[in-house]
Amino acid sequence: MQNEVVVLFGAGAIGEAIIRRVGAGRQVLLADYSDASLEKSAARLTEAGFTVTTIKTDISQRSSIQAVVVQAKKLGKIMGLVVAAGVSPSQESRERVLQVDLYGTSVILEEFGQVMAAGGAGIVISSQSGHRLPALTTAENQALAMTPTEDLLALPVLQADRVQDSLAAYQYAKRENVLRVAGESVKWQARGARINAISPGIVMSPLALDELNGPRGAGYHKMFESMVTKRPATPDEIAGLAEFLMDRRSAFITGSDFLMDGGITAQYWYGDVAEVRDSGAAK
């Protein structure tokens, strides 16, 4: 398996947890915008016995993603792709969220869809936020799934009159992610490869910890009390599902999205809607 490669975009807690499940015996290529994150994640994985190469990447730029493809091909046969990169709507502008989370993810799916090896599989980490939007029209779904990547940001559905702030941009980006996974999966199938998405709820990470200790913290804790788990998810729980979806056991699954949020989206739409929305679950 040493000639097999698994690529991770986003050297955070969820991505690293997935690599620990699917990267053993393979070449691991870590791509991230932050030198510090790359260094820390690579050190942890190397100490645990993984073979790791790093590359600094800005997924808002196609040329940067193409450089990752080139590096991955040098390492061997590309069998795995994990897309866990993105920016927070609490920290970035509407424009930056769309450029990174929507456009960047779409470019990754397109570029790697041209080089994945037969039998390979990928995972996109989306978000429960994509499930907060009301239903889009059939035409809007089709446009988000199939529009040429370089034309995506010009779509009417993504303009400022409709997507007015960074949180709305994040929700639209995450809805687009799962639609794009479905659309691109058709092309991946032609190569004998599969791609799926996971839409997690709140997962414990440094960013989540900041949110829990911030001004919306009380709302999140109230939300947890309404959930079956009474707590947020751990990165390892997300990784468990990702491992299954990237394994041969799930050979019949592609182009799908798996909502993994402790049931809060079901409450958002079908439970005590006012209470759930007031708790902060609309994020």
Image (cartoon, helix red, strand yellow):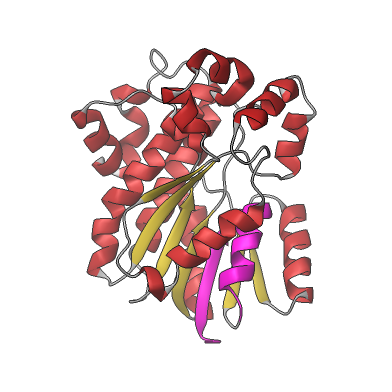
Q: Decide whether residue 22 is among the magenta residues.
A: yes
> Looking at the picture, does residue 176 appear above or below residue 1?
above
Residue 236 place in picture, x, y as percent: 64, 58
> Looking at the picture, does residue 20 appear above or below residue 261?
below
Give the quarter of the figure containing the C terminus: top right
Residue 199 place in picture, x, y as percent: 48, 44
Q: Decide whether residue 152 is among the magenta residues.
A: no
> Looking at the picture, does residue 15 appear above or below residue 97?
below
The residue lying at 63 percent from left, 54 percent from top is 14
User: Viewer-proximal residue, 123 or 262?
Assistant: 262
> What are the residue bounds of the magenta stretch?
1-24
Residue 241 place in picture, x, y as percent: 51, 59
The residue lying at 39 percent from left, 47 percent from top is 106
| 246 lies left or right of 191 | right
Q: Is residue 68 visible?
A: no
| 213 lies left or right of 205 | right
The residue lying at 70 percent from left, 37 percent from top is 208
Residue 121 place in picture, x, y as percent: 41, 67
